[in-house]
Image: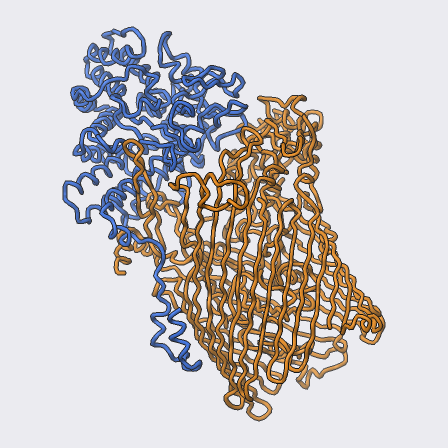
Chain colours: A orange, B blue
């Protein structure tokens, strides 16, 4: 068995010895002639043989959100965006399902050729288009990092011989929606007393009444302003913009603000040389509040007042949750940072058809955190007896240098070739540290480490390096061949080297092939008024995913395993605690795609249908090791699992006649995806989704989707002792508890009786976007829907330690002798088993965006001296239809444990008004 | 950035063919400390490898909640405690004898002890290859074997025969053998050989208190022989200790488990803990057992004395009030407990005073040293061995040293079985909550009878051993055989 050999090699002595030696888009065309950016090149949609989605900048700015990815939710088939409501947060993005359990499932972002994981520094108003490369034939040119799909972002450039100044801005309000109603003081007291048994909450402990969700939330102000100046002379073109954004969270005191400056420049030197740069500077500052306060508010007893008098917080002894408002107010947590991203490039047209280009891009960041814990006392358990300042810094850089050669050649009119060959290098590095010290005075001007009073010992923590680091080198080549304007072939090859892996596994080849056939060019299927265009596509490609911590294959020394001797003499201890796989590799995904692009009825109906099958081999997984091998967590990270994603994507667009006063166009996207862990190799079904009470709700298991919910089946509620005694039951089961089904019939209720009941991954997700225009008015309506996903209502399982608050509906409908419910269990303070009671439908339909705009007529524009002028009002997330009883079914998370609503972040709605003006 | 500048001088197309530089570019040394990187910069390699074994003694899984559950809650001394709804993960199962191979306590104790064994094996193997004076080498290896012996001592008493892993498994066969159970006798032999090697250690530690000693090895050899009913061997090792003159009982029993009783004349081996900053104590040992709930709550209130134990003390036995907190009483340092704690009794030996002892930062790692073996037990082992060898009057002499300190009158009898009963009973009250009771009852061959009388559904032929953790059975390729009845 191979793994044993690797285990042996990894073990202690062997490894000890082993390491002893020591661009731009200019086209306004639409439909099949539309130009889209693909890997390192551009293409018309007609020539594409793979699956690529594109969203234009004008559609992005309609959404009042921080990042471009949030704005494309529901716009593209095969692209699943799961938003998180907190200010400054990025969404979870899954392109064509989830292909990795723990290797990272987020796509690769390429901003003007610069590779990054985080695009929160890019103002959406600076973006000209977002392209999503979905299938492996499109992404293979990005090789070892492309397995989760690639999102290409192109920023705006100036045009020669034009000039304009524009302002685009909005201001609005964000507020909490969809609150879950909690029990009030009396219902809460009844429920808790019934549950507790040993001590009772008495009437005199009810000293007030608080709706904690109201107490901690607010209406937050949202604003975004951008000014762009573009222009160009005969030999140069430039784009300059300034953008300011501020989001106030619905949690009191929580906000995020960002200033970005962009300067993109092109210079034309002679007839054959173009040089230029892109540059994005961004600065952010955020006031952070612990999101756990939402959960605290959910748990807090409602029977006392949040504030007794100014500065004096209420408290209670009936539970140990603490006063959520005090938690919020006593948190002083700020982060701020600076980031510079940009490149310089040169393009040389050396001969007819031959272009050489070189670009050097860099991304430099400096993030800081400052947490000041103030001295306070709310109660005996909610207090902090000293003051502590913690300062942290995370700084790093990345550079990527691309050298490319393009050669276009047509041989008579039937044969068109486009070649690309290139070489890229990349390096990234960073470090992180945190220092803390007690006794720092509280006035803001004294909040520095050197004002602390505590002795330094033990209170200064250094962690280094936590950031990712590594180097990559790649060779790439690509050919596009068009025959007779109806057959299309594209092939690519990338050879990637990555420093993250052991020497023998550093290099890999990532090929792809795509074929297209425009059927409507054939004599047997001539274009007709009803069928304007029909193209078949087929493609295959192989891509990798190397998102893994650096040096995971290196057997290392674990230090800090200290022991005390004598009179408090703490001595260092070190050992080789972990067994590592010295043959670790990246995850490899192969994907087939078959697609149809069509246009019907004179171009009024357009669309695409794709079928894909993706198989990821060697997905990273922690394989369990028996305890006798002595690994500290009894597992080893290795390339163990195979995961498949199979899906169908359908896009249908409709455009009304353009010569009517009322115009509308609509676009519907639907994505069906089935995710399955094909096998775990030497791995075992592994529990994830901790409920923080010793129980787990999800699993990764062969034959199931990643993160499938794994629970007991319930069959109603035991109504009396006789029923309990007659059925298999857990020790301590009483009337009012769930009848857990003994699935395997062994007369006992154990883990073996648990069943798989679906996952957080939807069976289908839909986007439906419509635009109407009538005279000067325009209206945009976007719907988004998830169907077939499940949510685990984890917060309901936690009444650990007793006397947490309870949802009003649960308390009112609970089983009692007088109310023999068969669905809601008795009042209970213990740890319930995860059962299908907590698994709810996560399907929802949401009105994502509703925007009404008015474009000024000539008279008004003339009066203002503007080229264009538009006012609008927008409502974001105005309406949600859902079955789920909790706050939201839109729950981002790591692939094996998403979809559990345990740490609450409620959804919000935004209503705003804006202005776009161009001079 | 140097490489950037160098490469920038190449024309863009030429870079495609700059293969000669490619090899170097991807070399990015891993920024984690490898074994030799570290140990080449210190002469403390042997010490640190051995310290890391001691470190495992502090683990939650080794000596805390699960260990209390298996050694005390699963006996007649103690109940689960806490609130009825709070199971303590599986302590209700241990208390009620409805535990199973998936009960988490077994997995925790199994994994943690085997990790300790692995750390010991790595130290033994690594130190053997270090360039050190042989005396120093032998000393570190002897300490490693002492600790390995201790981990196996706890495993064999819990599970019976377990896999015998006495070196780092490197070959396929050695890896495969980690799934195979050796017999209990083979494990006992290994334990004895480990403690035999540890006899080369100094008899006591003068500076590094808490490290293994040859006296501690003698005590464990005596106790191992006790489990194997090798009475003369038990007696020989006990006699060595008794005649050495290095040990005597503390005058006040109630001081043994307080800070003032650390490393006393009675102490033979204890785990040295330190609650000050940075902390290093047995994780959760205090907080798991401290009185629960209310304004006077200190912890979670598990592992509470049973009424049966409370009633087991003879009138006038000073050990009762030193072992058991009764809710509402004020403690030795003046701390008032609450009459309304959810449990009537708590374990006094786990109590640490915030006022009168060094407390440090938090209650998760306290200064409480775990007294693993002490002189009173040596006397009781000597008594038992003497009695089994037919010297009941000698046995009573040893027994009465212990009784006298407890404030009790002498026990005399020449009836071997009466003396045996008296010694067993004495062990219970003397060593209550010192993680011995379940194993003592098993050793005495009467655990079924005692636990059934205590109202527990004990099944003969099954519950004499805890089950092998199911996880290990699953990973054992069919070679790891479960204990009977599970």
Q: Is residue A182 visible?
A: yes
Quadrant position of residue A602: bottom right
The single residue placed furthest to the left in the displayed view is B134
Q: Which residue is drawn at 32% across and 50% down?
A: A557
Q: What is the x, y in percent for residue A161?
A: 66, 82
Judging depth in this view, the residue of B179 and A315 nearest the camera is: A315
Q: What quarter of the picture does the N terminus of chain A occupy?
A: bottom left
Q: In this view, does A791 lie above or below A655?
A: above
Taking the image as shown, residue B426 lies to the left or right of residue A149, namely: left
Q: What is the x, y in percent for residue A297?
A: 63, 38
Quadrant position of residue B316: top left
Quadrant position of residue A568: top left
Q: Is residue A729 visible?
A: no
Q: Which residue is drawn at 28% across and 34% down?
A: A565
Q: In this view, does A828 lie above or below B43?
A: above
Q: In this view, does A5 lie above or below B78?
A: below
Q: Residue at x 31, y 35 (%)?
A: A564
Q: What is the x, y in percent for residue A524?
A: 68, 84
Taking the image as shown, residue B259 lies to the left or right of residue A340, namely: left
The single residue placed furthest to the front in the displayed view is A445
Q: What is the x, y in percent for residue A718?
A: 63, 30
Q: What quarter of the picture does the C terminus of chain A occupy?
A: bottom right
Q: How many discs appear?
A: 0
């Amino acid at each position: 068995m191979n793994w044993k050999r690797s285990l042996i090699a990894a073990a202690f002595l062997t490894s000890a010895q082993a390491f002893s030696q020591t661009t731009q888009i200019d086209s306004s065309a639409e439909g099949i002639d539309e130009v889209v950016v693909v890997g390192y090149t551009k293409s018309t949609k007609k020539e594409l043989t793979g699956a690529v989605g594109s969203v234009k900048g004008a559609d992005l700015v309609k959404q009042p959100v921080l990042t471009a990815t949030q704005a494309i939710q529901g716009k593209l088939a095969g692209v699943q965006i799961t938003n998180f409501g907190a200010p400054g947060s990025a969404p979870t993005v899954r392109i064509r399902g989830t292909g990795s359990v723990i290797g990272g499932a987020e796509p690769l972002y390429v901003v003007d050729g610069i590779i990054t994981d985080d695009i929160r520094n890019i103002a959406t108003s600076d973006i000209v288009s977002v392209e999503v490369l979905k299938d492996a034939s499109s992404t293979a040119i990005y090789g070892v990092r492309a397995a989760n799909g690639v999102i290409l972002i192109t920023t705006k450039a100036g045009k020669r011989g034009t000039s304009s100044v524009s302002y685009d801005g909005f201001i609005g309000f964000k507020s909490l929606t969809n609150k879950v109603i909690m029990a009030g003081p009396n219902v809460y007291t009844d429920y808790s007393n019934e549950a507790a048994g040993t001590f009772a909450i008495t009437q005199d402990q009810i000293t007030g009444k608080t709706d904690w969700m109201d107490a901690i939330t607010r209406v937050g102000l949202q604003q975004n302003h951008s000014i762009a100046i573009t222009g160009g002379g005969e030999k140069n073109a430039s784009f300059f913009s300034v953008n300011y954004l501020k989001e106030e969270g619905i949690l009191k005191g929580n906000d995020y603000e960002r200033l970005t400056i962009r300067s993109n420049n092109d210079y034309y030197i002679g007839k054959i040389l173009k040089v230029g740069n892109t540059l994005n500077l961004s600065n952010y500052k955020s006031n952070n509040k612990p999101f756990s306060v939402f959960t605290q508010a959910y748990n807090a007893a409602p029977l006392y007042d949040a504030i007794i008098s100014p500065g004096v917080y209420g408290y209670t002894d009936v539970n140990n949750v603490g006063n959520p408002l005090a938690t919020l107010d006593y948190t002083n947590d700020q982060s701020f940072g600076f980031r510079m991203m940009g490149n310089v490039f040169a393009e040389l047209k050396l001969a007819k058809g031959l272009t050489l280009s070189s670009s050097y891009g860099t991304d430099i960041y400096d993030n800081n955190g400052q947490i000041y814990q103030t001295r306070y006392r709310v109660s005996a358990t909610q207090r902090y007896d000293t003051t502590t300042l913690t300062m942290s810094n995370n700084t790093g850089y990345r550079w990527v240098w691309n050298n490319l050669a393009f050669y276009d050649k047509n041989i008579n009119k039937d044969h068109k070739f486009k070649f690309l060959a290139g070489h890229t290098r990349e390096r990234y590095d960073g470090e992180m540290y945190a220092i803390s010290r007690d006794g720092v005075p509280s006035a803001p001007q004294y909040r520095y480490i050197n004002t602390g009073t505590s002795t330094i010992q033990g209170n200064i923590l250094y962690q280094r390096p936590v950031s990712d680091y590594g180097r990559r080198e790649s060779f790439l080549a690509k050919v596009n061949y068009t025959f007779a304007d109806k057959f299309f072939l594209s092939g690519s090859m990338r050879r990637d080297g990555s420093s993250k892996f052991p020497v023998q596994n550093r290099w890999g080849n990532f090929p792809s092939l795509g074929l297209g056939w425009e059927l409507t060019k054939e004599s047997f299927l001539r274009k007709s008024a009803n069928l304007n265009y029909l193209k078949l596509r087929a493609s295959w490609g192989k891509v990798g995913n190397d998102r893994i911590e650096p040096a995971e294959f290196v057997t290392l020394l674990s230090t800090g395993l200290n022991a005390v001797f004598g009179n408090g003499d703490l001595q260092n201890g070190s050992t080789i605690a972990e067994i590592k796989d010295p043959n670790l590799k990246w995850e490899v995904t192969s994907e087939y795609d078959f697609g149809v692009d069509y246009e019907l009825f004179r171009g009024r109906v357009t669309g695409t249908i794709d079928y894909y099958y993706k198989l990821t081999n060697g997905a990273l997984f922690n394989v369990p090791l028996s305890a006798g091998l002595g690994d500290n967590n009894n597992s080893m990270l290795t390339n163990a699992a195979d995961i498949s994603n199979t899906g169908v994507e359908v896009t249908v667009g409709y455009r009304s006649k353009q010569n009517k006063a009322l115009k509308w166009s609509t676009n519907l996207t639907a994505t069906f995806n089935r995710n399955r862990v094909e096998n775990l190799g030497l791995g075992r079904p592994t529990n994830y989704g901790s409920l923080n009470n010793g129980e787990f709700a999800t699993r990764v298991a062969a034959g199931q989707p990643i993160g499938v919910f794994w629970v007991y089946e319930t069959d109603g509620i035991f109504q009396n002792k006789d029923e309990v005694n007659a059925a298999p039951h857990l020790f301590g089961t009483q009337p009012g508890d769930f009848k857990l089904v003994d699935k395997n019939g062994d007369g006992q209720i154990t883990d073996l009786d648990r069943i798989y009941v679906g996952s957080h991954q939807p069976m289908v997700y839909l986007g439906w976007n419509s635009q109407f225009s009538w005279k000067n008015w325009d209206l945009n309506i976007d719907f988004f829907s998830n169907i077939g996903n499940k949510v685990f209502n984890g917060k309901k399982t936690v009444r650990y330690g007793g006397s947490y608050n309870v949802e009003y509906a649960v308390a009112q409908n609970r089983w009692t002798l007088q109310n023999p419910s068969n669905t809601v269990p008795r009042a209970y303070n213990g740890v319930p088993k995860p059962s299908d009671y907590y698994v709810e439908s996560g399907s929802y339909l949401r009105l994502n965006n509703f925007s009404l705009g008015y474009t000024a007529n000539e008279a008004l524009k003339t009066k203002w001296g503007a080229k264009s002028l538009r006012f609008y009002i927008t409502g974001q997330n105005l309406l949600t239809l859902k079955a789920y009883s909790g706050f939201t079914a839109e729950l981002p998370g790591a692939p094996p444990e998403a979809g559990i609503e345990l740490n609450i972040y409620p959804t919000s709605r935004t209503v705003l008004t804006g202005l776009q003006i161009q001079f | 950035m140097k490489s950037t500048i160098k490469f920038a001088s190449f024309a863009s197309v030429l870079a495609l063919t700059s293969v000669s530089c490619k090899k170097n570019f991807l070399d990015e040394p891993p920024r984690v400390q490898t074994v030799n990187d570290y140990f080449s910069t210190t002469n403390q390699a042997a010490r640190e490898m051995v310290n890391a074994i001691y470190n495992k003694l502090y683990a939650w899984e080794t000596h805390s909640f699960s260990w209390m559950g298996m050694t005390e809650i699963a006996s007649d001394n103690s109940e689960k405690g806490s609130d009825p709804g709070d199971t303590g993960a599986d302590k209700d199962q241990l208390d009620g004898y409805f535990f199973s191979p998936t009960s988490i306590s077994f997995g925790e104790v199994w994994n943690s002890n085997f990790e300790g064994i692995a750390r010991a094996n790595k130290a033994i193997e690594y130190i053997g290859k270090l360039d050190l004076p042989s005396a120093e080498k032998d000393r570190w290896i002897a300490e490693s074997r002492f600790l390995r012996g201790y981990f196996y001592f706890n495993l064999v008493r819990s599970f019976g025969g377990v896999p015998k892993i006495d070196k780092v498994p490197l070959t396929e066969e050695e890896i495969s053998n980690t799934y195979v159970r050796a017999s209990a006798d083979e494990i006992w032999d290994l334990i004895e050989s480990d403690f035999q090697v540890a006899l080369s250690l100094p008899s006591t530690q003068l500076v590094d208190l808490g490290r293994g000693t040859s006296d501690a090895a003698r005590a464990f050899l005596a106790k191992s022989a006790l489990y194997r009913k090798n009475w003369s061997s038990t007696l020989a090792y006990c006699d060595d200790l008794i005649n050495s003159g290095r040990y005597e009982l503390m005058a006040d029993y109630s001081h043994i488990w307080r800070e003032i009783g650390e490393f006393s004349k009675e102490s033979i081996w204890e785990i040295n803990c330190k609650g000050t900053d940075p902390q290093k104590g047995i994780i959760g040992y205090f907080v798991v057992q401290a009185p629960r709930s209310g304004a006077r709550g200190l912890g979670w209130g598990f592992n509470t004395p049973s009424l049966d134990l409370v009633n087991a003390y003879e009138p006038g036995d000073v050990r009762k009030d030193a072992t058991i907190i009764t809710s509402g009483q004020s403690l030795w340092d003046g701390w008032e407990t609450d009459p309304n704690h959810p449990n009537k009794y708590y374990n006094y030996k786990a109590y640490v005073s915030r006022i009168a002892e060094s407390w440090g930062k938090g209650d998760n790692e306290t200064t409480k040293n775990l007294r693993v073996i002490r002189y009173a037990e040596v006397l009781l082992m000597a008594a038992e061995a003497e009695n089994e060898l037919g010297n009941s009057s000698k046995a009573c002499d040893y027994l009465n040293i212990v009784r006298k300190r407890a404030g009790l009158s002498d026990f005399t009898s020449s009836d071997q079985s009466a003396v045996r009963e008296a010694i067993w009973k004495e062990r219970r009250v003397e060593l209550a909550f010192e993680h011995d009771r379940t194993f003592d009852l098993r050793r005495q061959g009467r655990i079924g009878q005692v636990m059934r009388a205590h109202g527990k559904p004990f099944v003969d032929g099954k519950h004499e051993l805890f089950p092998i953790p199911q996880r290990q059975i699953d990973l054992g390729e069919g070679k790891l055989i479960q204990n009977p009845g599970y």
